[in-house]
Image: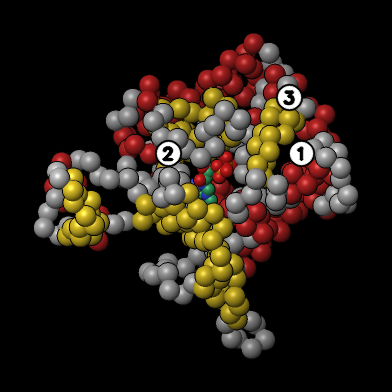
Amino acid sequence: MSTLEAPPDNCKRPADGAGDGDVKKAKLDEDAHSSHPKWTSLNSFKFVKVLREDPQAKSVCIHATSQLKRAADQSDGDAQSAEADAIILLEKTAFDTTDSGISTLLAPDTSLQQHFNNDIYGTYDSLLAPSLNNVKTVIIFPASAKHMEKYASHESHVIYESPEDYQSITLPYIQSSSFEMQWIYNILEKKKESEFIVYEDPDPEKGFVLVPDLKWDRKSLDTLYLSAIVHKHGIKSLRDLTPEHLPLLKNILNTGLEAIEKEYGVPKSKLRAYFHYQPSYYHLHVHFNQVKFTAPGSNVVGAHNLSDVIDNIKLYPDYYQKRTIPFLCKTNAKLYKCYEAAGKI
Ligand code: M7G
């Protein structure tokens, strides 16, 4: 594809250390905002547009705005308030198929409205008791341009990233971007979500924290989804993995699977463990989920099975530095524009 646009600024390799500076700045900017409020309803959000919907998954992702309160200004002591972007992800949850879940469904609280009947057939709308009408809701606020990019619906392309492309396009992009990783540091430092930790190995080299993932409603075992976040900083992704990391990877695979089986009773044979490439957050983490659940990003292009990764590195120590790795990229993504600007698309 011809490229007319100048490369976006964040395709360029920053001066030494500038990437780190961006991460620190993002951290400061985030600290400057008041923390995520505990909303009790959605009525303080102004609807902007639907970013994407998935009738099959029964989910919708909305762009909205809400008032962002900033800490009191030292000069006048008044708290400032400004409109900021929000992303609201709504997803209908799976049915509770335990005996008590089904009994509640069949209780008098469920009322039926008939559409039609014909011979032995009838269709209805069931109006369920509020306790059965749960819609899993994720609110990202204040949402950055990067969040908008991630959640907007855009066409995806497969990009074949050679080792040279990684060095000349992807790595400079990673180093010059900020990825809002504060949530990861909060988990590792036990500032947030510590009450949900399923397992932790505190070892600085081969240790990790295993927590329920944001994508999971934390109820249905059919959609069980956890993430193992490594304690060691500086391993950005699959591309960085070498034999030095084998003890870490084996530890995550073996101990992670055992911990999930112990906590949730889901056997190892019903779980998959994999990396995303490209990840959204360049701090190494592994996705664990139920094999019967088609998790977003578990497809053949984006997912790299952890046990395969271990075997590949055992067979070829520099496998992930030498191979071409395909990845899916949306046309609105900055990384896509970097590849386009380099004449690779
Ligand atoms: P990824 O492969 O970097 O990006 O995985 P993806 O979002 O495109 O999959 C990051 C994983 O971290 C995803 O599965 C997210 O759902 C999960 N995640 C993101 N955030 C912001 C949080 C969070 O605050 N808490 C938890 N527990 N998980 C999160």
| Pick the front one: 108 or 338 | 108
Neighbourhood count class around disc 2 (C-alpha, 10 Å): few under 14, some 14–19, many 20 upward: many
Question: Which residue appears at 56% of the width and 19% of the height?
Answer: 308
Which disc is residue 225 wearing? 2
Is the CB–ligand 1 distance for label 2 below 8 Å? yes
| Pick the front one: 214 or 327 | 327
- Under tag 2, what secondary structure? strand
116 left or right of 291 in image? left
Q: Is residue 3 visible?
A: yes
Question: Which amino acid is tagged 1?
Answer: Thr
Question: Which residue appears at 45% of the width and 46% of the height?
Answer: 215
Question: Which amino acid is tagged 2?
Answer: Tyr
Which disc is residue 81 wearing? none
Which is nearer the N-term, disc 3 or disc 2? 2
Q: Which residue is mark 1?
A: 170
Q: Mark 1 to mark 2: distance in Å?
A: 28 Å
State whether residue 175 is above or below residue 81.
above
Where's the N terminus, which quadrant?
Answer: top right
Q: Nearer the viewer, mark 3 or mark 2?
A: 3
| Pick the front one: 229 or 62 | 62
Expressed as whole percent of the image width and height from the top left, the position of residue 208 reads 51, 35
Question: Which residue appears at 58% of the width and 15% of the height?
Answer: 311
The quarter of the picture where residue 109 lies is: bottom left
Expressed as whole percent of the image width and height from the top left, the position of residue 269 reads 38, 21
282 left or right of 9 in image? left
Expressed as whole percent of the image width and height from the top left, the position of residue 342 reads 86, 40
Which disc is residue 324 wearing? 3
